[in-house]
Image: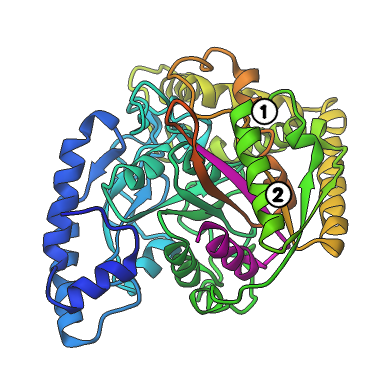
Amino acid sequence: MKKYSSLKEIQTLISQKQLTLPDLLAYYFKQIKNNEHLNAFNEVFFLSAEVQAKAVQQKIENGTAGKLAGMVIGIKDNICYEGHIVTASSKMLEGFVSPYSSTVVQRLLQEDAVIIGRLNCDEFAMGGSNETSYFGPAKNAANPELVPGGSSGGSAVAVQADMCLAALGTDTGGSVRQPAAFCGQIGLKPTYGRISRYGVIAYASSFDQVGPITSSVEDAALLLQVLAGADDYDYDSTVSLFTVPDYPVLLNEQKKHKIAVLKETIESEALDPEIKSAILKSIEQLKADGHTVTYVSFDLLDYLVPAYYILTTAEASSNLSRYDGVHYGHRNMEAKSLNELYKLSRAEGFGEEVKRRILLGTFVLSAGYYDAYYQKAQQVRRLIREKMDVLFQDYDLILSPVAPTAAFKIGDHLQDALVMYMADIFTVLPSLSGNPAIALPIGNNEAGLPLSIQFTAKHFEEDKLLAFSQAFLS
């Protein structure tokens, strides 16, 4: 069976009776078995996926199937699915069975997607390489000695290595876009609030956003249409109430755009020469296609990473305080006092990177440092948001790299937190401002590793971003 790159292709074959959904699922199970060395899955849902596949196949034959019938999809291991284990790739939640489903899982099932398993990620989504996972690192299918990116590394590898058609990740500071870039896939971070966060294990609540990783823009558009919009019961108070456009239909709206290139990102000394060359080549193609491309300055670049890590670690410190060994999560059974129970349970349950971020976040929120760090970072975030809003008064899209390098070797950056954090320098801008952004593949380097480019749009203009992406890749 060949690799399928879009749902439309699969649905056509099923309608022509050349393929059945149970057969397709069996193929993906075989692919997962053949690629076990990549460590993309924390668990494969053999039983529930087979039940779903048979039920959806029957719906297809009856003509009552939903929009996603035929899509086999994986979910990042921080997205709750009723009756299934969810761990956020942490010892802290080892064996925890979710008592309810997240909004995104509910909507996938309502439209008849088949959920094949939970995918490896950095612990509590904290990392940019998938090396902080309690279950060990996921590995890049292009070269298993390299990282797949993070934190949604397993999601990107699963699509890259044809273990499922699409996957859901979460993006706090680039955790969908960067692994998609390292694995040569399409990674979309919607506008903050476009998709409900209900049932998604929190890292930094004012940043976290669910996003799809796919091989085609059409599938990204369809998934966004299904997942976007407010909860029926207002589970997530930050979710947008705006009407959800018909993204797949709007893909055909081809327009010429005014594109701003962030000059400092292209001229950055950290940017790999091969990525720079590929991006410059893309810029020339955009001009040839009739788009207006202008270099603009963004003088706040040096403040992006510090502001991002101050704010996200502060929110992580608060969000992760609930994992104390009393309510739920890992519990030390030898503690002699309540204080000791808290200390030992958290020390044993959390990995080193999560502990580092909790400590940093607790520090910036502490008396005497709150004003100097947390409040100042919030002010910088406001300046960044305002500067982006000004840019979008004159431009339709903003162009920048996704990551400063292609995928790097496992273990190369793990011992140097600062180097790892600085790898987020290009992805955290849309995260701080809340804008939608997409990572698109632009070929490979001389070593055969995927390269990528990032486009950012105005708030809630995913339709424009997706239509442009469709034309850009065609």
Split into 4 quadrants, where in the image is the N terminus?
bottom left
At 31% from the left and 46% from the top, the residue drawn is 118
**Residue 326 location (% of width, % of height):** 43, 35
Q: Are marks 2 and 1 in contact (CB under 8 Å)?
A: no
**Residue 295 location (% of width, % of height):** 83, 46
Mark identifier at residue 271: 1
Q: Vertically, is 207 above or below 303?
A: below
**Residue 182 location (% of width, % of height):** 48, 36
At 43% from the left and 39% from the top, the residue drawn is 183
**Looking at the image, what colour scheme do you see?**
rainbow
Q: With 206 as the anchor, is 233 left or right in this view?
A: left
Q: Residues within 10 Å of mark 2 (few under 14, many from 20)?
A: many
Q: Earlier in the sequence, mark 2 or mark 1?
A: 1
Q: Which residues are magenta?
A: 451-474
Q: Vertically, is 341 above or below 201?
A: above
Q: With 337 as the anchor, is 334 left or right in this view?
A: left
Residue position marked by numbered label 2 in the rendering: 399
Q: Please name the amino acid that badge 2 sits on.
A: Leu
Residue 156 falls in which quadrant of the image? top left
Element under disc 1? loop
Q: With 13 as the anchor, is 404 left or right in this view?
A: right
Q: Residues within 10 Å of mark 1 (few under 14, many from 20)?
A: some
